[in-house]
Amino acid sequence: MKKSILVSAVLAGLSFGLNAEQPSYNFVEAGIIKYDEDDSTKVLGNFEINENFYGVASYELLTEEDPFGDIDVTTFTLGAGYKMPLNDNTSFFAQFEYVDYDFEDGSFSTSEDGYNITIGARSMVAKDTELFAELANRNIDDFTYTTLGLGVRQGFTDNFGAYVRYDRNDFGDDAYGVGVSLKF
């Protein structure tokens, strides 16, 4: 009896993710991000171009209340990525994005541009559960930083789900994100 329970447990563990497919790169997400002291809203979209290539775009608005007036930081990205299956349910990806960064505080505004380079992995650990990890390097004008991101996407229906993510950059700043996702 103990042997059959042990064998069943091992087989169940080995089959975790067997019914899962590759992660979808056709989705739109919208959510909020909590930085150490500020909050922002972000919309992100990915769309598959073919079996290996996809497009990506995002828009983020961070508003900081200041005694001298609100400060708005807007970030827009547009780029493309390459994805490659590592096994039946996990893929490696690399993407490059153009970044447009605008800062405005009422009396002063500036606009800079740069790029993001991101590599990572996404894995469907169950039919509706995806884990992801990514390492991103952002270069805006002369300012460069690297961020490690970890997260989970959970599907509730074939098209609707939610995500939670955690990011930490090389300056020690933390960010937590939560939102909804729509696959198409």
Image (cartoon, rainbow, N blue to C red):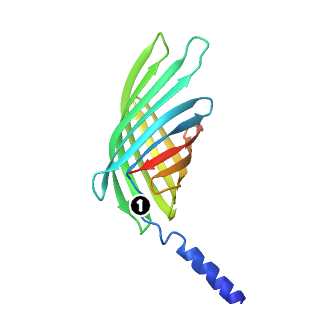
Binning the other alpha carbons within 10 Å of mark 1 as few (below 14), some (14 to 19) or many (20 upward) gives: some
Q: Amino acid at mark 1?
A: Ser
Position above or below: 153 against 111: below
Nearest to the observer: residue 31 or residue 86? 31
Left or right: 132, with 184 as reference point: right
Residue 146, horizontal then vertical, whole percent = 48, 41
Compared with 20, 131 (above or below) is: above
Which sits in the foreground, 141 or 157?
Answer: 157
User: Residue 14 appears at what percent x and percent y?
Assistant: 55, 76
Q: Is residue 70 left or right of residue 143?
A: right
Residue 10 placement (x, y as % from top left): 61, 79
Q: Position of residue 182 (x, y in %)?
A: 44, 48
- Residue 144 falls in image quadrant: top left
Which residue is rendered at x = 55% and y = 37% of the image? 33
Relative to 89, say whether 161 is above or below.
above
Residue at image mark 1: 91
Label 1: element kind: strand
Which residue appears at 62% of the width and 33% of the height? 36
Q: As drawn, which residue projects farthest toward the front?
A: 157
